[in-house]
Amino acid sequence: MDISDPHDPTARAIRNLIDVDGGPLAPGTFGSTLYNEDLLHLIRSITFLEETLNVVSSTNGGPAASVHLTRSPGMGATVRMVNDAHAAILVPVGTIARMQVMHRLLLTNWNRDGRPVEVMASVMDQPRQRAVPSGLAPLLGDLRGEGDWWQAIDALDATITLDPTFAPDVAELNHLSVSLLLSHEFAHVLRRHHEVRRKVRAGELAFEVGDGQRRRPATDAELARAIECDADLVAAYLVVVTLVKQVDGAGERGWLPRGFLRLAYALTALLALFDPERLSLLEYGDESAYPHPLIRYSAYMDYIRDAARQTSTSDAYDQGADFGAGKCLEGLAWLETDIMTAGRFGGPGADSESPIHPLRPSTAFTQELAKVQDEQRALALRLGTLITDHFGEFKLAAR
Ligand SMILES: [Zn+2]
């Protein structure tokens, strides 16, 4: 939408939101990492997704949604209800740049011989701060304020030598991770999460957990975690439906296994970019508003598999998804190997073993992990039922 109209109150409200998030993106406000056709690709992706999501929203009688890039170097997107009829999704350009650099870095390891070393860190390690290697700080650090962030990420980007034949993969991975990110934010709007939260707090809607005598109203944090999971579920479905439609539209069903491979790879890379310094499950306790990335990851992969089943594309999922996720985890392990054994990115710093991502399943704590997973899944399921009971069925497959 055109947000330059000085008399339109919606446009003015959106401009204010963008100003709070670093200001509007303009030529000269971003670095060389995106100063090329990759940014144009991404802007086309965003425009396409904006159209797709608006069709889904209007099919369900929901508000309009517009997507806006901002100058912030931060990680992650946010959604704001501007008014009842309009939601604005803000995407920091830093997030886009981080995805691009992450995909390029990881893909340099695609054809690497041998096996990466195993970092002895699990998802259950005691909570502690782990410094990100200095060279990876612009990628994984939770930086606010522009400062010299572009210089740092451009410098990191310049160290990557990636075979140019991977360019289509980078473009598609960027597209898929932006799809996951935007669809998640859009899901909050579509499923009226803000309204659900308000009504639950006001006592107009009962969101309860537990069974039988142990049934009780959910805490605020439980509701928040259930909402995040519900958004992931809807996002997974939207992304798969769109992927299948694109492949069918091109008359190339045979591309679908590669589509699922890339989707799983993009999801893994995206979740690895979140919360890199909070690696322990123990730090995501009862009060946390977000599930641990590993919990989100396993649920997300299940949701994608369910969506594949519902779109009769399970075979393609089976042929591509696990392999894609595994290749991305292997790429992450190679980065850690290079940090430990070759001092790459400035070496491991204070921690001799430098885990750089939170996606570590642990065989020693399988039961504890499964328990948290089950609890989280039950929360999301209950919220999904509540939302459907209250607002009716949602039509997610836009035609
Ligand atoms: Zn969310």
Image (tube, rainbow, N blue to C red):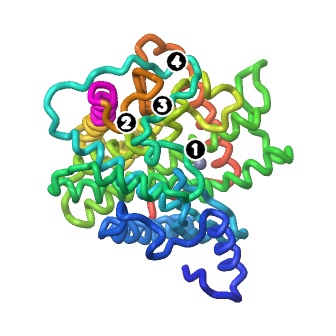
Mark 4: amino acid: Asp
Instruction: List x then y, in percent, for residue 360.
Output: 42, 25
State left or right for residue 129 relative to residue 309. Answer: right
Q: Badge 1, how many Cα within 10 Å: few under 14, some, many 20+?
A: many
Mark 2: amino acid: Gly
Looking at the rendered image, the disc whose residue lies closer to the viewer, 1 or 3, is 3
Q: Is residue 177 visible?
A: no
Looking at the rendered image, the disc whose residue lies closer to the viewer, 2 or 4, is 2
Magenta region's main secondary structure?
A: helix
Q: Where is mark 4, residue-wise?
A: 125
Residue 294 circle label: 3
Q: Secondary structure at mark 3?
A: helix
Determine the CA span between mark 4 and mark 1: 28 Å
Mark 3: amino acid: Leu
Residue at image location 44% in from the left, 39% down from the top: 134
The response on whether ligand 1 sits within 8 Å of label 1 is: no
Q: Where is mark 1, residue-wise?
A: 230
Q: Badge 2, how many Cα within 10 Å: few under 14, some, many 20+?
A: some
Determine the CA span between mark 2 and mark 4: 24 Å
Q: Tell whether position 101 is magenta.
A: no
Magenta region, residue range: 329-342
Q: Where is mark 2, residue-wise?
A: 346
